[in-house]
Image: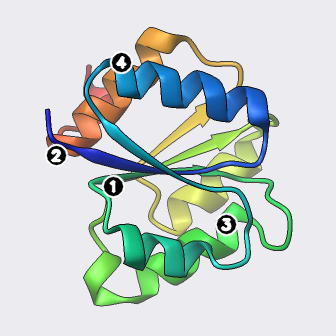
Amino acid sequence: MGNSVLLIEDEPNIIEAISFLLERDGWTVRLHTQGEGAVEAVTTADPDVVVLDVMLPGRSGFDILRELRQGAARADLPVLMLTARGQTKDRELAESYGVSCFMTKPFSNAEMLQTVRDLAEGRDPSAA
């Protein structure tokens, strides 16, 4: 696999777990740990998939997602959004902004890996 993921997350334990899991599967993982500059990081990294935390220092994941979806160049970029809260209103807001998939922490390694694979291949992870 030559696919790349941009992980936008500020929790060191989550960064370590997701990076290890994806790198072991052959992914190139790039990191960004702040809300500020996240859209620019997506542009620079040009990833196949973005894994985006909801709660980030400086700017929310919802704001980042909304901005990504406003530009035609990133309108179809697969975005997996992570949250510790998992409330229905958060899921609905993410869906209204065009999230590809929404996952609640904690998640299983198998679920994370399969979801990223599905998104990279253009498959709907919820259809599995």
Work out how far the residue at label 1 is from the one at label 4, CA to CA, in angstroms: 21 Å
Q: CA distance from mark 2 to mark 4?
A: 21 Å
Indicate which disc, 1 or 4, sits on the residue closer to the N terminus: 4
Sequence order check, earlier mark of 4 and 3 = 4
Q: CA distance from mark 2 to mark 1?
A: 8 Å
Q: Amino acid at mark 3?
A: Phe
- Mark earlier in primary sequence (2, 4): 4
Q: For mark 1, what is the residue?
A: 78
Using the image, tell me which numbered label, if any, was put on residue 58. Answer: none
Tell me which corner region of the image, top left, top right, bottom left or bottom right, holds residue 71. bottom left
Disc nearer the start of the sequence (3/1): 3
Locate residue 5 relative to residue 104 in the image: left or right.
Answer: left
For the residue pair 75 and 128, the one nearer the viewer reads as 75
Q: Which residue is mark 2?
A: 122
Mark 2 touching mark 1, by CB under 8 A? yes
Question: Residue 24 shows which numbered tag?
Answer: 4
Q: Determine crowd level at label 3: few under 14, some 14-19, many 20+ residues with C-alpha closer than 10 A.
A: many
Q: Find residue 62 and report its horizontal and vertical position in percent.
A: 67, 66
- Give residue 100's position: percent from left, percent from top: 39, 51
Circles 1 and 4 in contact, beta carbons < 8 Å:
no
Q: Which residue is mark 3?
A: 62
The answer for how far apart the CA atoms under marks 3 and 2 are is 22 Å
Give amino acid for label 1: Pro
Most extreme residue toward the right is 57
Where residue 12 appears, as percent x and y from the top left, is: 77, 35
Return the x and y of residue 106 as percentages of the image width and height: 70, 19
| Residue type of the residue flagged with mark 2 | Gly
Q: Is residue 85 above or below residue 92?
A: above
Say few, some or many: other residues with alpha carbon within 10 Å of mark 2 (under 14 / 14 to 19 / 20 or more).
few
Which of the marked residues, 2 or 1, is nearer the chain's N terminus?
1
